[in-house]
């Protein structure tokens, strides 16, 4: 057979394999070496039955160094798990879970993520840090980053502040001594309608030891 | 008043900073009540329709659904003139139709899909010109001609027509200003809970706690002592004087369900049904000016698009008169406003409250005259702006102080106006990137509108104090400012003050609007502090064997002015047997008092670059100089100046609301499509505080709040003309620039 025909065959075989589902992985591998004319449905192994439908499951989350066990709807976002189930309402909802505003930003293994676009079930193997995890747990003293926001008036209504602070924390871990331009671009994904933006930039620069 | 201030005028850190920066501060969305249900709202897909039937049986049968409300549950009393809690007619895409409460948000959203509504579509109008045509479909069947009569007026000073006709130079034109959505990041959420004695508590994101209490009580026909509104942290608070259905819907759901309900309509609602939208306008404007630059006549006729309901932002078109009737000393002026219904998102109160729309036509005409006559626009303003004693367009009293000279001079300095401005027609630059500068000035209320406001100050035994007033923190440092005023007046430290705000159960502050908080609520707080201090001084005077008038106080110490070493601590007086009652001082004000009236003033200067190949307008630098009388806290004041300017820049260059003209649906009801300035796109903005120290207000302070948003559309328009020789209307998009240059 020509080279082209072989390629066509392998494409058709792959699609058929995909449609049969993950349980038939072995069958796909077996089919790969079989020509299309030799394929017979009755000779294929029966796929495993699908697991029973559930809309919720047990979830274990690691947040601010603590372990939380809960039962969560599969659709529940990490943000709503934090707020509605774990009593950690510092992480906010600013755009109805469309990932547009960054008010729900938390750290997952040190990196800023949008918790409204992350499912609780997805977050199970992440070390999550929220705004509640920054201040000193015993004395209540503000972290240096929060202190910098306070001193530089990097807020107005304060609703976007937890998101900006978590974003800044993740950003500074990656870029510890940023220029002003780097700070402006690093924070550009979070929204502040009050327009406290220049002071937010100033606060992050101050926290990094830079700026005036 | 002592000139030696120790707390007022200082750049102190926000009193509520730690709570907000740790996420501990509670907005209404953060309230969780035992047994709480989750609520959602169903909205209309049609711009105008009658609801001929609504079947909620499937929704009610869904396991987990505890209550559904429709127009059949709506109280019969509307908010005047035209807003019922729910109706069997919808008038814009996004209008509220029904609400549900369920045990979790997913079930509530599923329940919305199970409500079966039969709509009979009706004809709709999407522009004021269509709405005003003879025979146009009526937005409200009982309102002829689609005109909101109660929101229209004519204000005349002298004979404007003849003053205009007699002027050496006459300028005339048509301009327009766009809608603008508040779209605050903070979500509007109401949590409603009934108590067994028939009382109702609502946690809301509200900046008008007492108005909200009265509105809910009036619609539900309840006495005020049974309705409590709580809103300590509002989140964004850029506009109230709107009537919000979601607040009452939460209460109705909670009643039906027999459980607390958190009604969260979602962000799309905030772009649409929440009335948090600025009126778009079209104006025909005339300016008559003499050879020597004296402004003789200003005539502005403005059509305001109201949208589908008139119940919010009811005074906006009247406030828009200020630039025509009171900003300048013109011999004659006339302002007319007409408000028109359309089947669009209803408009309401939004920071500036009519003044961005009212200033744009006037400032644009003055700038046109300046360019045409080759006169410095700043000089024309210096020559013509209102002076102390002139009648204020706010409450109609003579103006106290006017800081415009200093605003104009300092703003000009900040962008290098002297070296940068010259008339466009004298420019010879041939590069494709053109530079230009422009400026504008403003007058705006500082709350002197006869809006009563009260406060109390209670002193504890240890010399600390609690200030109580029905404010909500909306981010302007309101709690901080009143704490500084109370501390200064009492003579204690800033750290000694606790602020008790955010509830209708404390003395009524009248709400945060009209840029009134610092100037009027601040003064009520100062008076309350003064009265509390007087009570303590009575006892202290006895202890020190002097007269109360011999005493002063600072940093927690009460001392004899003539002999400061003779002193006693507040805590010693308050814990002594001389004082056996709680020290509570009361203060209130219905400003303006006496004959004078304070207004806020400002000047905005813009430098732009226009890329004549792409049409891109970028702001190189903007300066906003604000006359605030005295800045109680310069740090929060500067933050407000910058934040408000960024919002004004949004109106000029970034934010765009796009409505499908075929069916009235908004295509931009989310942040990504609509466009919000970020840290990467903000220009350099220089805030300048001008402090003439007014004769009114606490320590001579006036407000800032709304003002910075008012002028960017005007100054940038002038700067664009100065760069490319074309007058545009905002938003100043690339398409508009290229069309004006004949490139497309």
Image (cartoon, coloured by chain):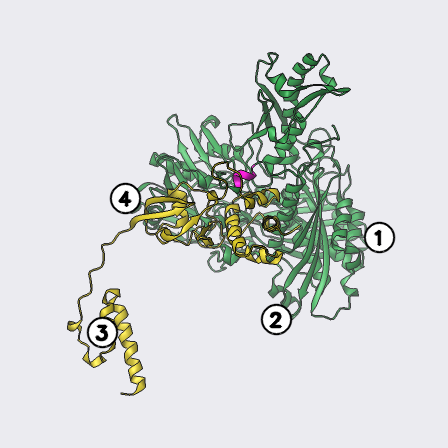
**Image quadrant where one finds the C terminus of chain B:** bottom right
> Which residue is disc 3 drawn over?
A30
Q: Main secondary structure of the magenta part?
A: helix
> Which residue is disc 2 drawn over?
B744
Badge 1 and badge 3 both on one subunit: no
Cα distance, mark 1 to mark 2?
A: 40 Å
Q: Nearer the viewer, mark 1 or mark 3?
A: 3
| Percent coordinates x, y for residue B519 in the rendering | 66, 34
Q: Which SS class for mark 4?
A: loop
Cα distance, mark 1 to mark 3?
A: 95 Å
> Which residue is disc 1 drawn over?
B292
Q: Which SS class for mark 3?
A: helix
> Which residue is disc 4 drawn over?
B63
**Image quadrant where one finds the N terminus of chain B:** top right
Please give the letter of the chain rendered in yellow: A
Q: Is residue B654 left or right of residue B721?
A: left
Q: Tag 2 or tag 4, which sits nearer the N-term?
A: 4
Q: Nearer the viewer, mark 4 or mark 1?
A: 4
Nearest to the observer: residue A69 or residue B460: A69
Whether residue B19 is in magenta: the answer is: yes
Q: What subunit carries mark 1?
A: B
Whether residue A20 is in magenta: the answer is: no
Q: Is residue B208 visible?
A: yes
Mark 2 surroundings: few (<14), some (14-19) or many (≥20) residues within 10 A: few
Q: Tag 2 or tag 1, which sits nearer the N-term?
A: 1
Where residue B474 sits, quadrant-wise, is top right
Q: Colour of chain B?
A: green
- What range is drawn magenta here? B16-20
Cα distance, mark 2 to mark 3?
A: 62 Å
Nearest to the observer: residue A56 or residue B94: A56
Q: Nearer the viewer, mark 1 or mark 2?
A: 2
């Amino acid at each position: 057979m020509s080279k082209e025909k072989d390629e066509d065959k392998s494409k058709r075989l792959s699609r058929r394999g995909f449609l049969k589902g993950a349980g038939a992985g072995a069958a796909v591998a077996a089919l790969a070496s079989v020509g299309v004319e030799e394929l017979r449905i009755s000779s294929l192994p029966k796929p495993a039955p699908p697991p029973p439908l559930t809309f919720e499951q047990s979830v274990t989350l690691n947040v601010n160094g603590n372990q939380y066990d809960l039962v969560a709807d599969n659709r529940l976002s990490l943000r709503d798990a934090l707020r509605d189930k774990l009593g950690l309402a510092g992480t906010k909802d600013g755009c109805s879970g469309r990932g547009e505003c960054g008010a729900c930003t938390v750290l997952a293994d040190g990196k800023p993520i949008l918790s409204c676009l992350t499912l609780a079930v997805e977050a199970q193997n992440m070390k999550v840090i929220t705004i509640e995890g920054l201040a000193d747990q015993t004395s209540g003293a503000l972290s240096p980053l929060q202190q910098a926001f306070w001193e530089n008036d990097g807020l107005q209504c304060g609703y976007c502040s937890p998101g900006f602070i978590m974003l800044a924390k993740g950003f500074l871990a990656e870029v510890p001594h940023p220029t002003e331009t780097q700070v402006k671009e690093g924070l550009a994904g979070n929204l502040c309608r009050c327009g406290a933006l220049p002071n937010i930039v100033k606060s992050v620069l101050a926290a990094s030891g830079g700026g005036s | 008043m002592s000139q030696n201030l120790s707390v007022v005028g200082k750049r102190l850190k926000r009193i509520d900073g730690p709570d907000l920066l740790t996420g501990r501060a509670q907005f209404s969305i953060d309230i969780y009540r035992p047994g709480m249900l989750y609520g959602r709202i169903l909205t209309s897909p049609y711009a105008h329709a009658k609801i001929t039937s609504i079947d909620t049986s499937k929704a009610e049968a869904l396991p987990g659904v505890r209550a559904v409300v429709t127009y059949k549950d709506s109280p019969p009393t509307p908010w005047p003139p035209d807003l019922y809690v729910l109706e069997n007619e919808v008038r814009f895409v996004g209008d509220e139709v029904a609400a549900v409460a369920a045990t979790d948000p997913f079930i509530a959203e599923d329940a919305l899909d199970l409500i079966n509504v039969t709509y009979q579509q009706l004809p709709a109008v999407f522009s004021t010109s269509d709405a005003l045509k003879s025979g146009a479909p009526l937005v409200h069947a009982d309102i002829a001609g689609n005109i909101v009569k109660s929101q229209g007026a004519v204000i005349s000073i002298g004979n404007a027509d003849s003053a205009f006709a007699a002027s050496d130079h006459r300028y005339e034109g048509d301009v327009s200003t766009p809608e603008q959505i508040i779209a605050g990041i903070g979500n509007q959420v109401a949590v409603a809970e009934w108590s067994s004695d028939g009382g109702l508590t609502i946690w809301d994101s509200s900046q008008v706690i007492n108005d909200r209490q009265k509105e809910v009580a009036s619609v539900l026909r309840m006495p005020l002592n049974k309705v409590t509104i709580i809103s300590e942290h509002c989140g964004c608070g850029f506009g109230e004087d709107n009537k919000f259905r979601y607040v009452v819907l939460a209460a109705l759901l909670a009643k039906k369900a027999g459980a607390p309900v958190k009604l969260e309509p979602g962000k799309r609602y905030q772009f649409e049904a929440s009335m948090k939208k600025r009126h778009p306008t079209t104006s025909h404007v005339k300016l008559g000016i003499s050879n020597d630059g004296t402004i003789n006549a200003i005539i502005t006729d403005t059509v305001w698009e109201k949208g589908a309901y008139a119940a919010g932002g009811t005074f906006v078109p009247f406030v828009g008169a200020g630039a025509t009737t009171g900003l300048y000393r013109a011999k004659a002026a006339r302002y007319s406003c007409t408000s028109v219904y359309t089947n669009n998102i209803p408009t309401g109160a939004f920071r500036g409250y009519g003044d961005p729309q009212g200033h744009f036509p006037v400032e644009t005409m003055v700038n046109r005259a300046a360019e045409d006559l080759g006169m410095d626009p700043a000089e024309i303003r210096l020559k013509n702006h209102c002076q102390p004693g002139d009648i204020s367009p706010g409450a109609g009293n003579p103006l106290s102080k006017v800081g415009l000279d200093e605003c104009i001079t300092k703003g000009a300095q900040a962008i290098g106006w002297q070296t940068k401005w010259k008339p466009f027609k004298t420019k010879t630059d041939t590069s494709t990137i053109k530079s230009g500068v422009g400026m504008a000035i403003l007058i705006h209320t500082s709350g002197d509108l006869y809006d009563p406001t009260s406060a109390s100050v209670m002193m504890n035994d240890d010399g600390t104090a609690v200030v109580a007033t029905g404010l909500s923190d909306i981010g302007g440092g309101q709690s901080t400012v009143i704490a500084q005023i109370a501390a200064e007046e009492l003579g204690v430290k800033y750290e000694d003050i606790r602020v008790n705000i955010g509830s209708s159960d404390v003395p009524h502050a009248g709400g945060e609007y009209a840029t009134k908080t610092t100037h009027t609520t601040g003064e009520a707080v100062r008076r309350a502090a003064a009265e509390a201090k007087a009570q303590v001084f009575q006892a202290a005077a006895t202890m020190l064997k002097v007269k109360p008038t011999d005493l002063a106080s600072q940093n927690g110490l009460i001392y004899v002015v003539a002999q400061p070493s003779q002193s006693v601590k507040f805590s010693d007086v308050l814990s002594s047997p001389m004082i056996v009652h709680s020290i509570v001082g009361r203060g209130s004000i219905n400003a303006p008092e006496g004959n004078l009236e304070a207004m806020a003033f400002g000047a905005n200067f813009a430098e732009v670059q226009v890329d004549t190949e792409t049409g891109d307008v970028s702001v190189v630098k903007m300066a906003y100089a604000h006359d605030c009388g005295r800045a109680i806290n310069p740090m929060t004041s500067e933050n407000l100046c910058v934040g408000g300017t960024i919002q004004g820049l949004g109106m000029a260059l970034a934010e765009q609301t796009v409505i499908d003209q075929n069916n009235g649906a908004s295509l931009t009801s989310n942040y990504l499509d609509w466009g919000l300035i970020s840290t990467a796109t903000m220009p350099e903005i220089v805030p300048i505080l001008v402090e003439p120290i007014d004769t009114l207000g606490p320590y001579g302070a006036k407000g800032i709040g709304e003002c910075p948003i008012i002028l960017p559309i005007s100054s940038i328009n002038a700067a664009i003309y100065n760069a490319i020789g074309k007058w545009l209307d905002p938003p100043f998009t690339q398409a508009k620039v290229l069309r004006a240059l004949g490139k497309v």
